[in-house]
Image (tube, rainbow, N blue to C red):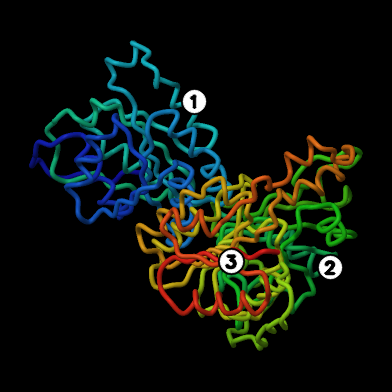
Amino acid sequence: MVIAAVSTSATQSMTGADRLCDALLAHDVDVCFANPGTSEMHFVAALDRQPRMRCILGLFEGVVTGAADGYARMSDRPAATLLHLGPGLANGLANMHNARRAHSPMINIVGDHAVEHLPLDSPLTSDIDSLARPMSRWVRRIADPTRIDHDVAEAWAQSMAPGISTLILPADMAWNEHVYREDLARGERLPQAPLEQATVARVGAAIRGGRKVVLLLTGAALREGALRIADGIRRATGVEIYAQGSNGRIERGRGRAPIAKLPMTHEGGGPLLRGVDMLVLIGAKEPVSFFAYPNRQGRLAPPSCEIVRLAGPDQDLPHALAWLADEVGVKIDASPMATSAPENPSNGALTVDAVNRLVAARLPEQAIICDEALTSSGFFDYSYDAPPHDYLQITGGAIGIGIPMAAGAAVACPDRKVINLQADGSGMYTVQGLWTHARENLDVVTIVFSNRSYATLWGEMSKVGAQTPGRNAQRMLQLDQPELDWTKLAGGLGVESSRVSTVSEFSRALDAALGRRGPYLIEAIV
């Protein structure tokens, strides 16, 4: 049972919506990213009676769920989302998919019609439960208004497992008044599955025996302390360590243990795993190619490689690393690591490489990077020696996460500068998030790599063996006729901006944006 006992007989009368708000706040869920509709108005009214709850409006549900993901990655606790019926939930599913892949805690409140109205099959009626299940760890429809606090307690416990909990709130469950106990049920964190000593011993024996071993990390194994343990094992034993291809959060930068990401491509990841005898998964999944390609297998590890799961994402990953270090007799050095500062590029026409190098060189201490640059990548490779920072990236491949994720990260960490490295095509999926940046005065610098195309798809056409793009294909891959104008888009959504096309222009714009608080957008013509 995940719910603590309640020990009082005192009672009070309130609406179900008020009880739901009280229960969320009892679990320190005090941020609600919302896009409500008619069915949720009583919950909105209840939120209005709770000054402790910070309510943040998103103009599209993908902004709402993406922001909740960014918030969870930086706070390690769930925000609530408020979504309108099945179509509203459906609009938010893509970034729920990213959040699920990042193992982000989240509690969705999805309104539904009143119970007696559902059989009438009015236009917005849908099967919300079925829509929610593929992206949720746990789904429940509130059916007993007197047990709303128990439903919230279990939703919180499941979200902290971690994962996504979805609570469906029929309108009459929100508006009707009931008598409730004054004390609220409290959720208790689900117990973590224990690590297996035999698996630790098996991996330790392979390392001591001189087999070629790779440790593949994600999740909490990529935080500073755990990374130091992994790097200590690497330096002492010669094993190789990588972060998996996409990760919710990595603590990196000067003085921290460096770790490379294992590319999710045959060209990048395959050679790094060539000749590996044992691949040890620590929170990570077996590495596979992002897509299927003709005449190629999906797995990146060689067929002879032994794949061992040392710990799953719902287990204690830092403890797994510490146990393995002890198994192979490694003592962890806690002294800071010696590194050097990244270099500034010289002047000239602006390139993707120059933008990424300049951002790495000018990065403020404890900045948060949200990376949806896609084909304009490079920051990660240039920022090993940048000031200490957190690195968040797209995790599930569903584009449109960058702008909302930056919003959520800025809400979670208001005293830290957030920099969003944003591809132009994917940015258009959730451009409405810039309005939320402006409305909440979030300290986010958005850098748009403006190449005016879905650049990644040009390469994919060749890799899958499709023909050379003709007129129809080119029109589906290019973002021109008309060209996107990000400065006008940003201005229309309340965010100050500038357009730059040389290294010196970008350098000045970046310095100005980093020297002020509040949202700013730089359109980098590359």
Looking at the image, is 496 positioned above or below residue 115? Answer: below
Looking at the image, is 298 positioned above or below residue 225? Answer: above
Q: Amino acid at mark 3?
A: Arg
**Location of residue 344 (image quadrant):** bottom right
Residue picked out by circle 1: 130
Pick whichever, 88 or 307, lies toward us.
88
Q: Relative to 397, is 520 on the left or the right?
A: left
Query: Foreground mark, 2 or 1?
Result: 1
Q: Are marks 2 and 1 in contact (CB under 8 Å)?
A: no
Secondary element type, mark 2: loop
> Residue 395: horizontal and vertical position, in percent?
61, 51
Decide which of tag 3 and tag 2 comes sooner along the chain.
2
Q: Amino acid at mark 1?
A: Ser
Pick whichever, 125 or 324, lies toward us.
125
Pick whichever, 276 or 386, lies toward us.
386
> Residue 93: horizontal and vertical position, in percent?
52, 38
Residue picked out by circle 3: 499
> Residue 309: horizontal and vertical position, in percent?
69, 52
- Camera sees residue 133: yes
Secondary element type, mark 1: helix
Q: Are marks 3 and 2 in contact (CB under 8 Å)?
A: no
Name the residue at 61% across, 82% down. Answer: 254
- Camera sees residue 1: no
Q: Residues within 10 Å of mark 1 (few under 14, many from 20)?
A: few
Please identify the residue farthest to the front as the structure is shown. Answer: 481
Decide which of tag 3 and tag 1 comes sooner along the chain.
1
Q: Residues within 10 Å of mark 3 (few under 14, many from 20)?
A: some
> Residue 97: horizontal and vertical position, in percent?
56, 42
Decide which of tag 2 and tag 1 comes sooner along the chain.
1
